[in-house]
Amino acid sequence: MRKLLFESLFRRPFTETAPSPDDAALSELAAAVGRAARRRLGRSLSIREVDAGSCNGCELEIHALNNAYYDVERFGLRFVASPRHADVLMVTGPVTKNMREALERTYHATPNPKWVVAVGDCARDGGCFAGSYAIVGGVAEVIPVDLHIPGCPPNPMTMLQGLLALLERVDAVAS
């Protein structure tokens, strides 16, 4: 035990070095999403995340949006606990048979206007889980999807770009 403690004093940590996102690009992208949300909604964009049966890879990247690097709340994006307070449903994973009804209820509990963003390759068509007896399929099999963000899992910058594209498309349709 003593030897182990002594070695741990001089051993390098096992953690990987943090990615170095381009701070200027990140700030510009997040600010653009915030401006688009305020222009379209008159306030910040509220997001409800729904795990419909994922492996949690997409959730880890979604959680990264709130960490010290990305800190998207400073730009007016916030995650809410209730679908009744949400503008956007971010749905991850293939929809399992057990989550189908919960996803439908969450969709119907979200007030209009609402948008559904399917995050990850599994949310598109079931990904590597396609054909399993336990899943229904992609998110579009259960509820209408406005935007799909590809990736396994997509990184936070890709998600921000997807949200910006969604808001710009909604703004163009409304004009």
Image (cartoon, grey):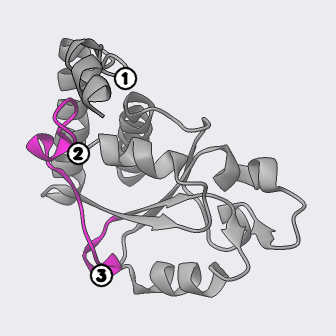
Q: CA–CA distance between discs 3 and 1?
A: 42 Å
Instruction: Decide which of tag 2 and tag 3 comes sooner along the chain.
Output: 2
Q: Which residue is mark 2?
A: 66
Who comes first in sequence, dot 3 or dot 1? 1
Residue name at image x 35 percent, y 38 percent: 164
**Measured along the vertical axis of the image, is residue 101 above or below residue 74?**
below
Q: Say which mark, if any, is on residue 104.
A: none
Q: Which numbered disc flags the more N-terminal residue, 2 or 1? A: 1
Which residue sits at x=57%, y=83%?
A: 104
| Image vertical order of residue 49 relative to residue 161, above or below | below
Q: Which residue is mark 3?
A: 84
Residue located at (51% from left, 87% from top): 105
Q: Are marks 3 and 1 in contact (CB under 8 Å)?
A: no
Please tell me the numbered disc located at residue 14. 1
What amino acid type is highlighted by mark number 1? Answer: Phe
Labels 2 & 1 near each other (Cβ < 8 A)? no
- Rendering quarter of residue 99: bottom right
Residue type highlighted by circle 3: Arg
For the residues carrying marks 2 and 1, which lies nearer the camera in this image?
A: 1
Q: Is residue 97 left or right of residue 7?
A: right
User: Is residue 172 visible in this depiction of the protein?
Assistant: no
The amino acid type of the residue labelled 2 equals Asn
Q: CA distance from mark 2 to mark 3?
A: 21 Å
Residue 107: x %, y % from top left: 49, 78
Element at label 1: loop
Give above or below for 141 relative to 130.
Answer: below
Q: Residues within 10 Å of mark 1 (few under 14, many from 20)?
A: few
In magenta, the rendered stretch is 66-87
| Secondary structure state at the residue bearing disc 2 | loop
* 10 Å crowding of disc 2: few (<14), some (14-19), many (20+): some
Q: Provide residue 59's location: percent of width, then percent of height.
A: 45, 52
